[in-house]
Amino acid sequence: MNSQALQLFWSFGPFVILLAVIGIYCILVTYNLIRALIGIEILIKAVTLLIIVAGYVTGHTALAQALVITLIVIEVVVIAVAVGVVLGLHQHNDSLDIRKLRNSKG
Amino acid sequence: MPIDIIILILLTLAALWTVMSNSLLFAAIGLALTSAILTIVMFRLNSPLAAVFELSVCAGLISVVFISVTTMTQPQSRQEVAQHTRDRLGRFKFLPLIIILVALALVILNLKPGAPLPTPETGEDVRNVLWNQRPLDLIGQVLVLLTGVFAVVIFFKEKSKDE
């Protein structure tokens, strides 16, 4: 990676870090299950941006796009299954607050 | 390049609004806005196919899923909503401060935004890479999709048996 590519990478890098900080903070602080999923989504957005920028500065945009498409498919499946779990927990507990999840087995 | 910086700042602000908004509906809309702005960044970084996927799947499908689950969950009473809003503001009030501190630290580290975008290399075709060079990724995608479908089917089947 030459110096121009490195400089370009680091011009996008701070925003990747900021997005990751927002996502991690959301996951750590919230008590709502849907907001935790939203935090995961924002973290995945940061990873997506990082892959696209890395592919651009190294000249392998096709490979980066292939990886991002795989990432998006996995993201959709994870969110779909997690939303199903959240709906089931809400039907059992009448709440999305993780502090009220007291009747889980195990 | 300044337009890229402006778009990236808008992306960060959209993500911040998503996390800070009181309503889950606004959070879902903010997530769709974040995905849409990320799509613009991806178009500008010469990744049109991934950008179309991001726009249609993340800004479309996942937003619909989040809005659906928000409307399907039980609405809270007005007192609960007020108490919840106060609790949230107390917990999330440090996030803008943390964002500003991290941004200042990155500025102090002398990361220079404003580098001109180099001309992209257009030698490879994404379809060629996806189908010929990385077929295992496709098999993995199919397996993950099937796993997700079976998980959701089993989940709702057990739930209907309970009822």
Image (spheres, coloured by chain):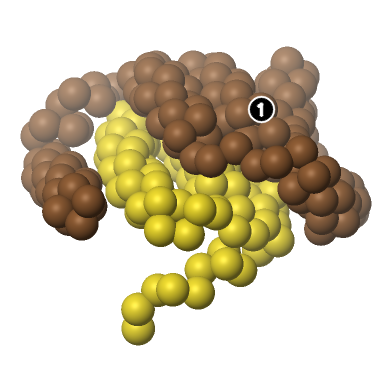
Chain colours: A yellow, B brown
x, y percent for residue A81: 31, 48
* Direction from residue A30 to residue A90 in the image, left or right: left
x, y percent for residue B35: 53, 26
From this view, report whether residue B16 is shown above or below residue B59: below
Q: Check disc 1 and give the amino acid type.
A: Phe
From this view, report whether residue B107 is shown above or below residue A101: above
Kindly identify the residue that appears in the image at 59 percent across and 59 percent down.
Answer: A97
Q: Nearer the viewer, residue A3 or A28?
A: A28
Residue A10 showing in the rendered view: no
Q: Quadrant of residue B114?
A: top right
Kindly identify the residue that appears in the image at 69 percent across and 49 percent down.
Answer: A22
Q: Residues within 10 Å of mark 1 (few under 14, many from 20)?
A: some
Kindly identify the residue that appears in the image at 59 percent across and 47 percent down.
Answer: A35
Quadrant assignment for the N terminus of chain B? top right
Name the chain under label 1.
Answer: B
Q: Nearer the viewer, residue B13 or B137?
A: B13
Mark 1 — residue?
A: B26
Q: Residue furthest front?
A: B163
Q: Quadrant of residue B116?
A: top right
Count of residue discs: 1
x, y percent for residue A53: 52, 36
Q: Secondary structure at mark 1?
A: helix
Q: Quadrant of residue A89?
A: bottom left
* Direction from residue B95 to residue A28 in the image, left or right: left
Residue A22 showing in the rendered view: yes
Q: Nearer the viewer, residue B92 or B158?
A: B158
Kindly identify the residue that appears in the image at 61 percent across and 29 percent down.
Answer: B25
x, y percent for residue B129: 19, 32
Q: Residue furthest bottom?
A: A106
